[in-house]
Image (tube, rainbow, N blue to C red):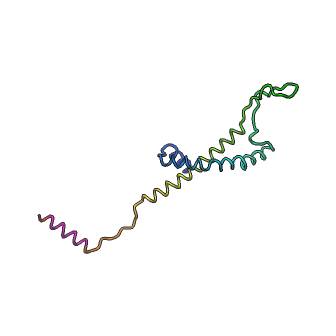
Amino acid sequence: MGIIKEFKEFAIKGNMFDMAVGIIIGTAFNNIVSSLVKDIITPMFGFWIGDAPFQELKIILKPKITNEAGAVLQEAISINYGIFLESTLDFFIISFTIFLVIKTFNKLRSKSLEPNEKTVPTRKDIELLSEIRDLLRDQK
């Protein structure tokens, strides 16, 4: 559940840098992810549900009307849910990829902002000089 919580925080509280990186990465990966979904993932689903191309899955509300010669008089009215499912899957893969990139950038940014834990001890002569300075200041 931690990754879902982080994604919600990213989506709600993202700053301009996160948005800019998201837009750039989303644009860059759009064609790759669309091809992954269209050419690899959805054909597997189509094979799994029975040799139908995934993009052609639809519910026909009204069939097309043709005349005796075969010319289409009125196109069919249908709900093309296969194309919708493909676009939805495409969106989720792209948004999850962008989220992972932003998460990596945020980790790198937080590591660069952390102060170094290395503390160098003050040399003894500098401590003594500081004490002398403070004593002289108190005397005046």
User: Which residue is pictured at 49% across the width and 54% down the height?
Assistant: 106
Q: Nearer the viewer, residue 131 or 89?
A: 89
33 displayed left or right of 105: right
Residue 135 in the image: state x and y as whole percent.
16, 67
Q: Nearer the viewer, residue 67 or 45?
A: 67
Residue 37 in the image: state x and y as whole percent.
69, 47
Q: Nearer the viewer, residue 133 or 23?
A: 23
Q: Is residue 70 above or below residue 18?
A: above
119 displayed left or right of 27: left
Q: What span is in magenta?
A: 126-137
Residue 100 in the image: state x and y as whole percent.
56, 52
Magenta-colored stretch includes residue 71: no
Magenta: predominant secondary structure element?
helix
All told, the count of numbered labels is: 0
24 displayed left or right of 46: left
Residue 114 in the image: state x and y as whole percent.
42, 59
User: Which residue is pictured at 44% across the width and 59% down the height?
Assistant: 112
